[in-house]
Structure formats: structure tokens, C-alpha cells
Image (tube, rainbow, N blue to C red):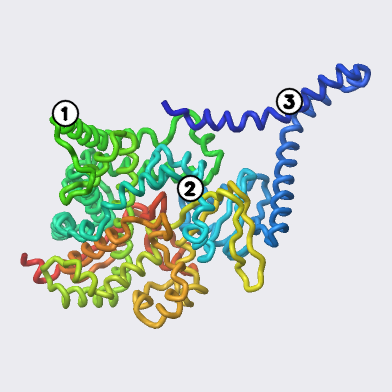
Amino acid sequence: MAVPPIISYAFRRVPRLLAPLALVYATQRILQSQNPQLASQVSTLTWVVAYIVSLPLALTLSVFYGDWRDAKEARKHGAVLAPQVYDKWPGGLTMLGDLIENFKFGYLMEPVETWAKQYGNILNIRIFFANSIFTSEPDHIKAILATQFDSFEKGPLFIQQMHSLLGSGVFNSDGDMWKFHRSMTRPFFSKDRISHFELFGRKADSTIDQLKARLREGHAVDIQDAVSRFTLDSATEFLFGQNVNSLSAGLPYPHTGEAHSSDTHPANVFARAFGKAQHEAAFRFRFGAEWPLTEPLRLRTQDSMDIVRSFIDPILTEALAKKRDAKRAGILQDSELVEDDTLLDYLVKHTDDETVLRDETLNIMIAGRDTTATTLTFAVYLLARHPKALARLREEILSHVGSSRPPTYEDLREMKYLRAVVNETLRLYPAVPFNARTTRNAVLLSPTTPGGKPYYIPPGIGVQYSVWLMHRRTDLWGPDAAEFDPDRFLDERLAKYLTPNPFIFLPFNAGPRICLGQQFAYHESSFFLVRLLQAFSDIQLAPDAQPAGSRAPPEWKGAPGTKGKETIQPKSHLTLYAHEGIWVRMQEDSLAAQI
């Protein structure tokens, strides 16, 4: 049985709390034994004050010593420390409040963006006296993901924060465990397998049929809900050979958000629990190593993960039982991947550990379902706001595949504007807006100004990076960085900005931990967009159907960058999403309407 995080937290923290008290006590005892006369002159109140003061004094000395040590090491390496964001309250309490407020109600990453404007694109956000480096510099992110890959890891804190959700899966492991998971899953994402569009076709057509039916009733539709069902059913069938049939629950109606069949439909319960677990796990990031104090008696993710596992575990149990039955029958299973294998079939060939199987499939499910759903949600959102781009994309689709034929792999390769639309969506609304690593050893990151000094990062320090902020920087993408313009991936701006510095565009990470499902995500999102725009000739946002609490607040209007243009509220847990969906109305193509 796993040790509750609050227990392990206490074991780490209690010795540090007791040490100064023990020092005062030892001083008192030594004084009493060595010099009783002097000891008698020290009042009880003095000792009480000494005990009380010892704790903040020890903390202050520890912080000052750490700063002195780090500054000394930085000078030794000819480097400087990342600038520390000032907070008038000790422990960075103001910053913590800003981050919590932003997580719940604000525009994504806005506090960090504000601090970066004042301190630069690398800074130290110290909360509860713990250093935490944040960067949106391409060269720094390149070092983290590629050139200094071995100097960074997920780290014990990140793994602990995410363990109740991700276990020891590929996204929450380091070293040999990460290599084991990576080696198991890599063969499954071969070109032949991810280019097999029959699954996409069935699920896309079912989704579009439901969209048509709801629109014909005169209602707006939540495109985020629809594509999330599409990707969830596709992902679970791709992974397990059977899906949760979330499309069978029906699409929600405006305002109420209730599914057509029932809010208690098993697929709705599963999807809601899956999203809630991610939200609760991501909230822990704001508190750093102190996060167990916010969940002292019971993990907030527990109820949600119990629901998720109630769906997953029977599937795993059945797969392992089939393996045991085959073994008893003397049937030898080939460990190699064969054409009809699901990912679970393949994983079962390599391990009997149900925990490993659960962790890995859940990790891949989050990647397979959420990232593509995010891309499709915001692609439709952007196309609805930019009718000229919508018309141009639809013209390309109809000229290549017509109004009814499903696209092939070769079709998708030829549709350059389609790929540019997907890339521009990923630039402005990357599925994973920020990520984190921990330094395994002392690291030097390149200076941010010509002739400047590098930045010294001590070992064991959390380093967070944001592609959300990097993708929107005007110095990297040009003065129109806040604008949706797919042509930036086709015209001279491509050679001016991206070609000489490819690390300014990292929607799928890079280096050894680059997303294995990158091409799968491109294919799935591109395929769905083709089928959607074959069926519908126009898309418009439906602000009247958008729940009031999810609309962009009036005070956002006119704000610089993308914030002032939003009509909805982008949010993020592990992946990006639109708060309470994006509601749209779509006009059926005249030919599609006759089918």
C-alpha cells in the first residue's frame, strides 16, 4: 500500500523543523550542566522566546546561505543567477495568490507574462522559499529537451505530484523506467499504423452525423464536447480494441450542458472524471513541494481516478486472462507487433504487471484524446473567427478530395494550407501550454543578450518552460505574432523566423522525449477537419449559447495580444481546453444536406 503523500511530506519536513528546536534544547541542557549559575539567570520567558525564534531564524539563515552558495557557484562559472521576482510578502505569498487566482479565473499564463516583461524571459519565481526557474527562451528550451537532455529529468517532485494520475507511466518517469515505457510504446506508432484511417473515418462520420442532427433541431453545438467524444472513442478503440462509446451518450444541449440521453451515461461519467482528475492534479503545481498540505486527509484525485479505473481495470484484467489462457493451452505468443494488435495487446506481450499496463495506457490515452481534441477545438474556434481562412481551407479540401470522399494519407500530404492551419492553431493554442523538468546537476543556460553572462541553475531545481508564451513572442515570430495567419507557415516568414530557429515552434516537445504520437495527432486532426468542412460550408460562433460564466469577461476586450480578441476563456490542466466549451452554429453544405 502506497504511503500517503502527507506522511512522506511529514517525514521530510519534521526533521528540519525539529533541528533548530533541538539545538536550543541542547544549548539549554549544556548550559545547565556546565554553568548552572549562568543558567539560573536566564528566565523561562527567554528560553520560550528562543524556541519560538529559532524556527524563523533557522529558515532565514538557510535561505541566505542558499543564496550565498548559489551566487558563489554562479561567479565560479562566470555566470549569473536568474532574476528573482520581488514579492513584498515572505515566501512569495502574493505570487502564490496571483497564480491560484489566475488558474481559476484569469487569462492563461498572464502573471508569468507580466513578470517576464519586467524581469526578462528567464526568471526565478520563489514560492515558499523554494527556487523555481521559468523560461520562454528557445535556446533554454532546446537545452532542456535536447542539447543538455541528460542534465534534466522529470524529478521526484513532479513525479510525486502526478503519481495519483499518471502513476509511473511514460510521462511521469525517469531513467530506466522511462526507457522501458518508451521502448514498449515506440513500435506501435509506426507510419503504417498511424496512417490507417478507417478508424478515424468511422468515428468522424458518427460525430458529424450527430452534429448535423442537433443543428437541424435548431440548436447550437459545443464543438469541444463533440471532438472530445470523437478523440476519446478513437483513442480507446486504438488502445484497447474497444471504446467507451461516448458518442452514444449524445451531444449536450445549450445552457444546461446535459447530455441528450442522461448526464449519468457511463461514458459521460468516465469523461467527466477523467477531466476532473487532471484538473485536481495540475492544481498542485502552484504549491510546489508543499502541495500535500492542501490534501492532508484524502487525495483530491482519488474519487475521480476510482471511476476511471473502474472502466480501465476490467479491460486490463480480460487482456491478462486471455494471455494466461493462451499460455495454459500451450499457445506461444510472438512478442513482436502484428497487424491486428491494439496497444494493449502489444503491451501484454511484454509485461503481466497490471499497474504498469494501467499507467501506460492512461498516459497514452491522455495524450491521444486530449491533445487532438484541443487542436480541433481551437482550429474550429479560429476558423469561425476568420471566415476568409475557412473559405480558403474548404476550397483546398474540395479541390483535392471533393465533397464526400474520405481523404487518404497522400491527400493530407498535398494539402499545404490544411497543414498550415493546423500548425498555426498549434502555435497560438498549443495542446500542452507549459511543462516542467528538474535539474539533475548544475546547469548553465545561455545568456539572453549578446555578450551577456550565462545563467547558473543549481542542481535539484525545478525548471518550467512555456511554449504558450514562446509561440506568441513578437521578437521570435514578428509583429503580427498575436494574429491567426496560417500563411506564416507558407510565405517568406517561414524562412525568416522558423527555418533558422526551429526551436521557436515546439507543440510536441523535442529531443529524446518528443511526442511519439505527433504524426498520429496531425493525421487525426487533419482527417477530421477535412470531413467537417466537406459537410459544413460555414461556421459561426454562438455567443447566445455560450454559458455566461465561460465567455471572455468584458474587461478583456481591447487588451493587448490575443487576450483582447478572445470570446471564450482558455484554461489548462495538463492540456489546454476551453472553459465550458465552444458553442457554434454551422451551415450544412447543400450537397451534404441531401445525403
Mark 2 Cα shell of 10 Å, populated few (<14), some (14-19), many (≥20): many
Which is closer to the viewer, label 3 or label 2? 2
**Pointer 1 or 2: first along the chain:** 2
Residue visible at 43% across and 43% down in the picture: 176
Q: Which residue is mark 3?
A: 22
Q: Looking at the image, which is closer to me, 281 or 361?
A: 361
Residue visible at 86% across and 16% down in the picture: 33
Residues at marks 1 and 2 touching, judged by CB atoms closer than 8 Å: no
Which is closer to the viewer, label 3 or label 1? 1
Residue visible at 44% across and 30% down in the picture: 298
**In the image, farthest residue toward the bottom:** 492
Q: Which residue is mark 1?
A: 328
Q: Quadrant of residue 578?
A: bottom left
Q: Amino acid at mark 3?
A: Ala
Relative horizontal placement of residue 498, taking residue 490 as reference (left or right): right
Q: Which residue is mark 2?
A: 154
**Pointer 3 or 1: first along the chain:** 3
Separation of marks 1 and 2 at Cα, in angstroms: 40 Å
**Pointer 3 or 2: first along the chain:** 3
Separation of marks 3 and 2 at Cα, in angstroms: 35 Å
Q: Quadrant of the C terminus?
A: bottom left
Residue visible at 47% across and 29% down in the picture: 4
Separation of marks 3 and 1 at Cα, in angstroms: 62 Å
* Secondary-structure class at tag 1: helix
